[in-house]
Structures are given as C-alpha cells and as structure tokens.
C-alpha cells in the first residue's frame, strides 16, 4: 500500500509537473509577444509611434506631450476636421515624377513640412532638441526651435547641418525679448515666429492630477528617474487654481518693436480669425501660422483647418499662411495645402519619434509624412506643390 501523500509532497509533484510542462513557457512566450516593443522599421504610419513613445517615457512626460486644455475638445476637433474634407481625385494625369519642394521667405524647402516648436525635449530624450534636430536634418526638414527648449539655441544649431527657424515667446521685459531674438539670429535662425495665443498658463487637468508624481528630471532615463523619485522628498504641488501670467499684455505694437532688431522674416503663430489675419498683414507680419497651439490653451477654439479658408481669403495671398494642428497623414497635408496653406508644421509626432527611437525616430516620422504626401499627390494627379489648389477638395465643415 503506497504511503499517503503529504501536502508538501503533492506541492513538489505539481511544481515538477509544471516545470516540465509546455504550458508555462507558452504562457510566458505569449506575454513576451504582447510586451514586445516593435523595431523602428515595423512602423507603418505616424500613429504607431505613439504607443511606443508612451511605453518609453515617464508618465508625466507622456501627459505633458499629449494633453489638451480643459475638456480637450479642441484637441479632438483638430483631428476630426480632416474627416470633414474629401479629396477629389483626377485620374488621368502624368505623375511619373513628383516634386514636393516649395519656397518660403526666399528659402527652398524640400517638403512643405516643418517641425513645429515644442518645449522641453529633454523630457523625452536625454539629448533633447539636439537629437530632434539631428533627425529633422536627416529628413531634410526645417525645425522651428521653441523658446522653451531644453538647450540653448546655439547648441541646438551646432548639433546638425541645415536651416533652423525660431519660435519666440515675448519675455517680461523688452530687453529680455530682444536678447532672445538676437541669440536666435546669431545662431543662424532664418525666421522668427512670435506665438500670440498664450496670455495665461492654461488649465491642464492631466498635469494637475500628475502633480503628485515626481517631476521629470531632464535627461534622466525612466528607470533612473523612478529610483531617484522614490528617494526624493515630495515637493509641494503647484497651486491648482488661480492665474499664472504668461503674455497677458501683448498689443499689435509688438510687431513694430520687434521689427527694429529682427532682421529675418517675422511670423505670428496662433492666428484663428480672418480679422486677426488682416491686422497681422496691416501691422507688417511677413507670415502667419494658423494654430490653436495643439488644443493646449483655449478649449472650444475652432480647429485650425476649419478656419483656414476664411483666413486665406482675408490674407488674399499678400503673405504666406502656414498651418498646424492635428497633421498626422500625408492626406492631411494635402488637404491643408489645397485649402490655402503654403506649408504645415507637425508638433506631437516628431516627439513620439524622439521618445520612442531618438533621432532615427524623428527622421522616420518625417519621412513617412513625406512619402504619404507624395502618394496622395500622385493619386490625385498633382505632380508638384503649385498644382495643388481648391478644386482638389470638397468641404463639409459643420
Ligand atoms: C509638448 C508640446 C509643447 C509645445 N510647446 C510649444 C512652444 O514652446 N511654443 C509654441 O509656440 N507652441 C508650442 N506647442 C504647440 C505646437 O507648436 C503646435 O502648435 C501644435 O503642437 C500643433 O499640433 P499637433 O501637435 O497636433 O501637430 C507645443 C505643443 C506640444 C504638444
């Protein structure tokens, strides 16, 4: 008669059975497949960079990049607006060679696409804007450097070849603003764009929730940062309510003041109405960027695409009109060009590329957009940028 099985012996037998069984490795393997970070060359479109970016950066950095203000209505509307525009193809056309180059402010651009100014790239990669610029230059794309960059403008300029533009936030004093512009010009920036839609720091609810998390330390990898934050004494959270001034006192006179020492073309970024576009022309702006700051300042502002036609009409070709907000596909770019934009800027996608794969990711994001634009042009019978016009689109804005 076999000895009765003790509890301990039964557990040992079960463990031996599991160790020899194919069930456990199969479970682990499927989990590994699930958690696998795809390689760069697996990325089929720009959206696919976003989950990889999310997996690789700190939560606070992810939220800083993705957020919109308040209920994020305008953030969503920026994307939705592209669904209200249909492309009307012309089938019989010789599109055997495609030319995506264009000219802006006397400068030749290989593509009508720029990297929009976004602050604080060190949250996404230890080398921040230096790495973004390397990727943008490799994709033959101009980067507009933010006033809130993690590195000084001369260092960013020196990190790669190719033209640079500069985005300006007016500082508290005229001298401070002048210094910023002069530094940018000395570093070789060929355009300065003053952002005009930032009267007060906006209410970013995702960041208010995250104020209990450790603030990201520029340059720290996620693992190092997490270890550090566990040791660090929590800082008092920033006040969630109340007003924090940014540029509440801008007047049209600023254009004249800037003109005294700004030797390069001067743009206004953040125009959303025909009336402001007309005033910008009258006050001597060399160009405007139709933008709602990626839905980060005024919620329930319109999407930039839906106001583009009326702004283009008000400007009447006197100065170039550029657009940003929600550009994620080559067809989005084609629609914006057909509605009157001379070029577009992309904000979040290069950051997804940066955080996910560094400079190579930035480059790939831009190259995907370039290739998709070329395809969209080919399939709508347009061989160059000059041949893209209003007849290309049917618009159903609500
Ligand atoms: C993380 C982040 C930081 C930004 N920082 C700035 C900035 O410093 N200056 C500025 O003019 N716009 C800034 N913007 C707005 C962008 O220049 C651009 O208007 C917007 O991102 C375009 O929308 P998209 O992200 O949907 O492409 C920022 C946007 C993001 C997402």
Image (spheres, rainbow, N blue to C red):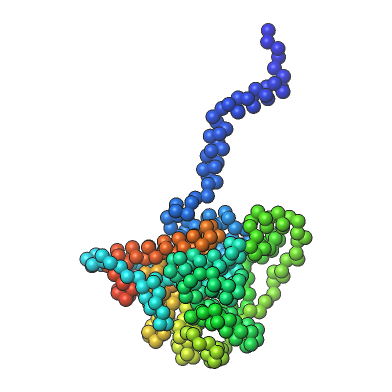
> Does residue 36 sit above or below 2 in this rendering?
below
- Residue lying at 39% horizontally and 87% vertically, measured from the top left: 318
- Res 236 → quadrant: bottom right
- On the image, the x and y values in percent for residue 153 come to 57, 75
Q: Residue furthest top?
A: 1
Q: Residue furthest right?
A: 233
> Does residue 36 sit above or below 101 in this rendering?
above
Q: Where, quadrant-wise, is the C terminus in this rendering? A: bottom left
> Does residue 36 sit above or below 312 in this rendering?
above
Q: Where, quadrant-wise, is the N terminus in this rendering? A: top right
Whether residue 80 is visible to the viewer of this picture, yes or no, is no
- Res 216 → quadrant: bottom right
- On the image, the x and y values in percent for residue 370 come to 39, 65
Q: Residue furthest left?
A: 92
The one of 190 and 394 positioned closer to us in this rendering: 190
Q: Is residue 367 left or right of residue 151?
A: left
Q: How many marks?
A: 0
- On the image, the x and y values in percent for residue 201 come to 63, 75
- Residue lying at 49% horizontally and 60% vertically, measured from the top left: 360
Whether residue 30 is visible to the viewer of this picture, yes or no, is yes
- Residue lying at 47% horizontally and 75% vertically, measured from the top left: 163
Q: Is residue 37 left or right of residue 81?
A: right
- On the image, the x and y values in percent for residue 218 come to 65, 64
- Residue lying at 32% horizontally and 76% vertically, measured from the top left: 386
Q: Is residue 106 left or right of residue 2?
A: left
């Amino acid at each position: 008669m076999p000895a009765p099985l003790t509890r301990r012996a039964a557990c040992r037998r079960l463990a031996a059975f599991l160790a020899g069984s194919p069930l456990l490795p199969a479970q682990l393997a499927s989990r590994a497949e699930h958690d696998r970070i795809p390689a760069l060359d697996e990325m089929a479109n720009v959206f696919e960079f976003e989950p990889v970016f999310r997996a690789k950066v700190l939560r606070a950095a992810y939220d800083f990049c993705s957020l919109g203000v308040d209920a994020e209505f305008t953030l969503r509307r920026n994307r939705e607006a592209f669904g209200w525009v249909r492309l009307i193809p012309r089938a019989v056309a010789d599109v055997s060679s495609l030319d995506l180059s264009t000219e802006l402010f006397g400068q030749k651009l290989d593509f009508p696409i720029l990297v929009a100014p976004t602050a604080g790239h060190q949250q996404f990669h230890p080398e921040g804007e230096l790495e973004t610029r390397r990727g943008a230059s490799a994709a033959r794309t101009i980067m507009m450097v933010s006033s809130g960059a993690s590195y000084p403008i001369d260092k960013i300029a020196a990190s790669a070849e190719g033209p640079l533009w500069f985005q300006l936030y007016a500082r508290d004093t005229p001298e401070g603003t002048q210094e910023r512009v002069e530094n940018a010009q000395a570093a070789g920036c060929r355009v300065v764009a003053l952002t005009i839609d930032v009267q007060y720091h906006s209410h970013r609810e995702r960041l208010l929730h995250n104020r209990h998390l450790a603030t990201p330390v520029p340059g720290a990898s996620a693992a190092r940062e997490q270890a550090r934050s566990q040791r660090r004494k929590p800082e008092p959270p920033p006040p969630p309510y109340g007003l924090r001034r940014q540029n509440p006192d801008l007047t049209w006179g600023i254009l004249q003041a800037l003109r005294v020492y700004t030797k390069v073309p001067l743009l206004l970024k953040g125009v959303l109405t025909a009336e402001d576009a007309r005033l910008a022309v009258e006050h001597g702006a060399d160009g405007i960027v139709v933008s709602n700051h990626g839905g980060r300042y005024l919620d329930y502002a319109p999407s930039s695409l839906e106001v583009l036609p009326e702004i283009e009409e008000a400007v009447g070709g006197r100065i170039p009109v550029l657009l940003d907000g929600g550009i994620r596909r080559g067809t989005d770019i084609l629609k914006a060009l057909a509605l009157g934009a001379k070029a577009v800027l992309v904000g979040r996608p290069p950051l997804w590329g940066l955080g996910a794969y560094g400079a190579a990711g930035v480059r790939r994001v831009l190259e995907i957009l370039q290739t998709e634009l070329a395809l969209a042009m080919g399939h709508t019978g347009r061989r160059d940028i000059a041949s893209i016009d209003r007849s290309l689109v049917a618009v159903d804005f609500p």
